[in-house]
Amino acid sequence: MKFNKTQSPSANKSARRGFIKSIAFTTAAIAGGAMIASPQLMAAGQTWKIQSTWDAGTVGYSMFEEWCQGIEEKTGGELKFKAFPAKSVAADNNALFDSVRSGVLQGMNPFTLYWSGKIPASVFLSSYPAGPDQPAQWDTMFYSLGMLEKTREIYKKLGLFYVGPIQHDANIIHSKKPVNSLDDLNGMKIRLPGGMVAEVFQKFGVSSVSLPGSDIFPALEKGTIDAADYVGPAVNYELGFSQVTDNILFGPPGVMSVYQPVDLMDLTVNLRSWNKLTPKVQQIVEDEVRNYSQRHYQTIQKRNIEAMEKFKADGSKVSRLSQEDMVRFRKAAIPVWYKWANKNKDAREIFDIQLKYMMNDTVGYITPEDIKGME
């Protein structure tokens, strides 16, 4: 700014004072703006604590942790996921469920079936005996036939938001003696999950035992059980099952398991936390769950193929149930389906979506004759 030399000294002083004031005002405005902006910038990024039911060091947890680390970049810094392995914040499944409801954790990555005691409909949110047995069928029901929307309605009642399913694997049985048909199961003592699975196997003379995963190997080694269901080949080989069993039971060709062929996990979050996200970030998270589901499933399948070669190298033999056995198994399972579907309205509504799908000619698993007399 130039001062006019022809002006009086007092006029020049006045101009200088005005110039200095304008600089001071501008500086204060800039500083004030920064002070106003800082809290906004700090609030822009949320960090969510999310606990998985995978143990640290497992392939499942490694994949989940890697996926969580990518969320911050994909949301432009608006949301960050901090992953925790099983039992690191919440000590058990009940505590995990309650921690997400209360907001101690903002999310969880469980096997959906864990909540059958709290959410009866959850037995139909992961595969069940002789039900839909292909991952694509489950994605179709969730994303095309209204099952996702219905599931979210159920979870909302509990203060939770079910973001979406995550495909995992099938569960298979490792046994000390060969099992070549359903009749060979009679009299065997098998580690099985409870609920629908145990009830159907009991119809074929099986004595079922519930054991945590860490107790399966010693029980097989000591002979206190004859066989054990657990997850798929990749994880089961790492647990040493080839050292204590000689046989693996699959379903008919193309079906690894007749009783739990599509074991689904999910991402479930605290509803209040979900509602704080912008619609744009919510959509990113939903899309990323679908992407992660595919990646998780495909990685596990690759590991399964590699593990089966190791099982065979260790001397394990594979046997398969026949299509006739599959028909018999489904016939035994159908009354159990209805028993669980009728536990409450929500369970029945989910089951009805699936039953209608299974009866459609594109699937053809169920005929009107199969469910005659069932209600």
Image (cartoon, helix red, strand yellow):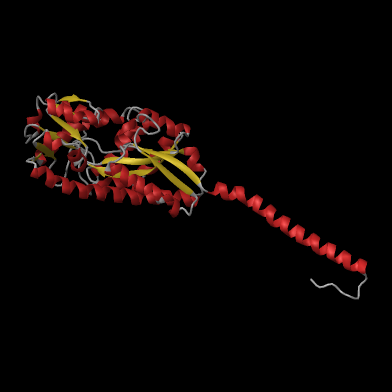
Residue 135 vertical placement versus 26 (above, below): above
| Quadrant of the snapshot with the N terminus | bottom right
Instruction: Report if residue 31 is visible in the image.
Output: yes
The quadrant where residue 85 appears: top left
Left or right: residue 259 versus residue 42 is: left
Residue 175 place in picture, x, y as percent: 11, 33
Left or right: residue 274 versus residue 205 is: right
Instruction: Report if residue 289 is visible in the image.
Output: no
The quadrant where residue 260 appears: top left
The quadrant where residue 193 appears: top left
| Quadrant of the snapshot with the C terminus | top left
Q: Residue at x 35, y 41 (%)?
A: 266
Q: Residue at x 46, y 42 (%)?
A: 48
Q: Nearer the viewer, residue 99 or 86?
A: 86
Residue 203 vertical placement versus 31 (above, below): above
Residue 341 place in picture, x, y as percent: 30, 31
Q: How many numbered callouts?
A: 0
Residue 143 place in picture, x, y as percent: 35, 48
Q: Residue furthest bottom?
A: 6
Q: Residue at x 26, y 38 (%)?
A: 127
Residue 44 place in picture, x, y as percent: 54, 49
Left or right: residue 297 versus residue 103 is: left
Q: Nearer the viewer, residue 239 or 155?
A: 239
